[in-house]
Image (cartoon, coloured by chain):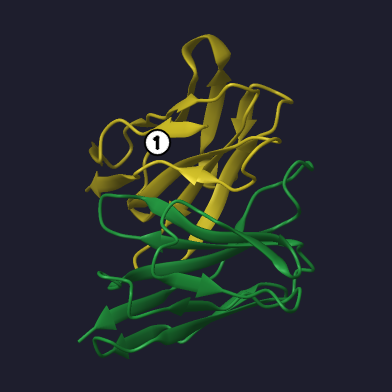
Amino acid sequence: DGGITQSPKYLFRKEGQNVTLSCEQNLNHDAMYWYRQDPGQGLRLIYYSQIVNDFQKGDIAEGYSVSREKKESFPLTVTSAQKNPTAFYLCASSRRQGALNTEAFFGQGTRLTVV
Amino acid sequence: AQSVTQLGSHVSVSEGALVLLRCNYSSSVPPYLFWYVQYPNQGLQLLLKYTSAATLVKGINGFEAEFKKSETSFHLTKPSAHMSDAAEYFCAVSVPTGRRALTFGSGTRLQVQP
């Protein structure tokens, strides 16, 4: 089945540690996105990528980093510089924006907790 | 820049009653508009989308939404609520120029009372 796979589903991190969240898609989509979800704030865009080897900062990129070396993969690293990393992280993909049918398809999310 | 406002962070209806979830958008160019649903600890699932074809859009699970340019609205409705409709609903906007990513509203949690 085609879709987006995020792993792990739950992740615990000690303060001061970097951690990487995995996101893989087999939908042959050009664009991929990372969103952060906090209660009452909806989804906020962290980073997005329209093509391989290119990505742009979203609204809350500080303390995060990404790479896009392959079309299928868009890992997100939460660094120790992120002051409040506990949240639900959602990865999504879509055809390149500007085309028809530009809805985003979402993974099941990773819940990150700092302990 | 585009934005979305969802009025009402919590909406409660009785089973069988009309569901109305409000969404207003702001965009300097004709937008694409979407409604997503999220069940606890899961990702988002697309309910319906408006991409400049028919202004009344029908989606899954009996939901529909009407694009009203004059009111900059895209409210979500369902004639008769079911217990399984209890979830969080997000309205989102994207535009074919500028930043090419969905911008989401803050969400509305729908509660369905028996």
Can you tell which chain is drawn yellow? B
- Say what amino acid the circle numbered 1 marks: Ser
Residue B6 is left or right of residue A56, and the answer is: left
Question: In this view, which residue lies farthest toward the top?
Answer: B70
Tell me which corner region of the image, top left, top right, bottom left or bottom right, holds residue A75. bottom right
Task: Answer whether residue A102 is visible to the viewer in this image.
Answer: yes
Tell me which corner region of the image, top left, top right, bottom left or bottom right, holds residue B58. top right
**Marked residue chain, label 1:** B
Which residue appears at 54% of the width and 33% of the height?
A: B64
Q: Find disc 1 in the rendering and name its residue.
A: B80
Residue B43 percent coordinates (x, y): 47, 65
Residue B59 percent coordinates (x, y): 59, 41
Residue B57 percent coordinates (x, y): 62, 30
Above or below residue A18? Residue A72 is above
Identify the secondary structure beneath mark 1.
loop
Residue B56 is left or right of residue A85, and the answer is: right
Which residue appears at 30% of the width and 30% of the height?
A: B7
Task: Answer whether residue A108 is visible to the viewer in this image.
Answer: no
* Chain A tint in image: green
